[in-house]
Amino acid sequence: MQRVAIYFKLIEGKALEYEEAHKNIWPEMTEVLDMAGFRNYSIWRQDNMLFAYYEIKNLKCAEKILNDSQIYSQWRKLMENYIFIDPVTGQKEWVMKNVFIHE
């Protein structure tokens, strides 16, 4: 099982809207995440910084399922209303390197 952590930023003033969207996540979106094999997916917020963590058996397979999903595409487009996108690079999220695990 691969552990993945990413961080990203919210656009100033969009935190409550972002949280509301996730309180009302589409059932079809959670089905796509299940089909892709996401487990223990959680998102944490501190001010405008977000930290997401999930576990996945096959990241390449999961990425293919997500990329082929119209629902996922629509959800990501909706999230662009809330997420900071670097105007130069277009980057929205930054993958973090795991340096320690205690089990």
Image: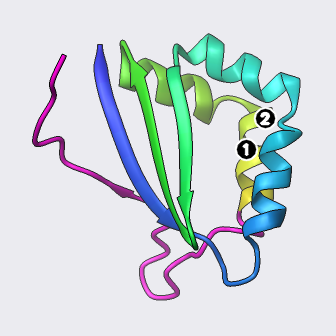
Name the residue: 52% across, 87% down.
Answer: 87
Q: Is residue 92 magenta?
A: yes
Q: Quadrant of the image for the C terminus?
A: top left
Q: Secondary structure at mark 1?
A: helix
Q: Position of residue 26 (x, y in %)?
A: 87, 32
* Nearest to the observer: residue 73 or residue 85: 85
The residue where tag 2 is placed is 70
Q: Is residue 34 above or below residue 18?
A: above
Labelled disc at residue 73: 1
When asked about the image quadrant of residue 45, the answer is bottom right
Q: Is residue 78 magenta?
A: no
Residue 56 located left or right of residue 67: left
Three-letter code, disc 1: Ser
* Nearest to the observer: residue 50 or residue 86: 50
Label 2: few (<14), some (14–19) or many (≥20) C-alpha neighbours in 10 Å: few
Name the residue: 50% across, 21% down.
Answer: 40
Name the residue: 76% across, 74% down.
Answer: 14
| Residue range (magenta) | 80-103
Q: Position of residue 6 (x, y in %)?
A: 39, 50
